[in-house]
Image (cartoon, rainbow, N blue to C red):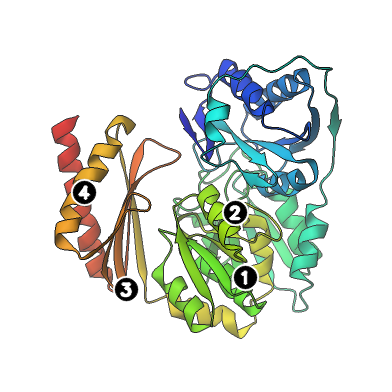
Amino acid sequence: MKKTISGIRGVFGKDLNLKEVIEFSNNFSSLIKSKKCVIGRDTRPSGIMIQETISAILMKNGIDVFDLGMVPTPVIFRESRKYGAGIVVSSSHNPIEWNGMKFILDGRGINEKELPQIINHQEILKSKIGKIKKIKSTYIEDARKIIGNIENKPEIVIDNGGGAAKDFALNLLKNIGCDVEVINEELLDCSRGPDPTSDELTELISTSNNKEIGFAFDLDGDRLVVVRKGKKLSPDITLGLGIAKSLELGYKKFVLSMDTSVSIEKFIKEKGGTSVRSKVGEANVIEEMLKNNSEAGGEGSSGGFILPEFNYCREGILTSGLIASMLENKIFLEILNYMKNYVQIREKIEMDSNHHDKIIEHVKNNLAKKYSKVITLDGIKAIIDENTWILIRKSNTEDIIRISAESNNEEKCKIIINNIKEMVKERYDKIK
């Protein structure tokens, strides 16, 4: 089981059981000052059981529950702004047998100071039983006000991946003026896995070949991958397109995660904007946004564009509408052409999380001897030259070490990441 600011995640029935769900729900109750909490789930089979358990515990602790049912994560974040708190029943891009809980306070994910209060047992004073009410979201209407209408009726394919985004993404894109086809609508018989960033998206590539663009979502709808002209684009390009749209709208202050493409940072600077870096992870990006009063940003590895005025979370559904609205704009091709010369490679190595810190420390010592600029904000990042970097960090959501690299030279990027992979594996073999 993983317990981080990204949420509680585990294999349901193995290391995440209803006993843990009850405990974490009880503990989170102590942080809900408004005595109101929105709750929703993605399409995982275990979702309804977990949601009903959470609702019962919240109500026992005197909290009124507002039930959204099966909805995407961004919808729950959006509605939580009205009620003060929220819980998402999902493990995002993890395999189907996984599930989890993501906690929301004041429209944002929890931070490092709040996490211990959820993990450690809290005694809750008895109170009257809370009520439960089913509600409908105004998400589509709210998003449409941000995006506006599209006149040219672009032809778009949505690969729902069997997830919770299906009705919201379809209805939003249709409402702003798109001609939309949907594939993999239901989880049963879906042709791909839950994570579009790692899947080849073969069916979407084929189906969208004669259309203007294709969009693939993960199970809870916060991740978005773009397919265009028979090619799956990198998650960094999804973020880059969101940033380009923000610049077009006049936004100037951005936050980018440590693993986001340097090309986006350079593009922002060329357009007169500024950017700062944060730790990887949605909650870390948002915390930095709040600290710096930033207007937009995100993390490249997940294709996670974030627009704080609308939502304090990765926004796959809103981003699909924003991208659709800019298909014929000059800046759309400009950012694609700018980023095409940069190559990102992202790898992961499974290993016992008890060894993560030792591995990171070993790599840090080696890279510090070789490169003059080493950043330790999140794991270890070595700046090799103005267009090339390598980042090694432990995952917030899985028992893996993540290795990311970027360069404007593909061969150079491959060599760098392979060298680090060998270093990590050799060290792991010695200490395990």
Label 1 to label 4, Cα distance in Å?
45 Å
Task: Report the amino acid beneath label 2.
Answer: Arg
Splitting the image into 4 quarters, where does residue 44 fall?
Answer: top right
Splitting the image into 4 quarters, where does residue 254 fall?
Answer: bottom right
Task: Report the amino acid beneath label 4.
Answer: Val
Mark 3 crowdedness (10 Å alpha carbons): few <14, some 14-19, many ≥20: some
Tell me which residue sits at (19%, 56%) in the image. Answer: 367
Disc 4 secondary structure class: helix
Q: Which residue is mark 4?
A: 363
Q: Which mark is first along the chain, 3 or 2?
A: 2
Label 1 to label 3, Cα distance in Å?
33 Å
Q: Is the Cβ of the residue at disc 1 closer than 8 Å to that at disc 4?
A: no
Tell me which residue sits at (62%, 51%) in the image. Answer: 313
Q: Is the Cβ of the residue at disc 1 closer than 8 Å to that at disc 3?
A: no
Mark 1 crowdedness (10 Å alpha carbons): few <14, some 14-19, many ≥20: some
Q: Which mark is first along the chain, 3 or 1?
A: 1
Label 4 to label 3, Cα distance in Å?
21 Å
Q: Which mark is first along the chain, 3 or 4?
A: 4
Label 2 to label 3, Cα distance in Å?
26 Å
Q: Which residue is mark 1?
A: 211
Q: Which residue is mark 2?
A: 314
Disc 1 secondary structure class: loop
Q: Which mark is first along the chain, 1 or 2?
A: 1
Q: Which residue is mark 3?
A: 387
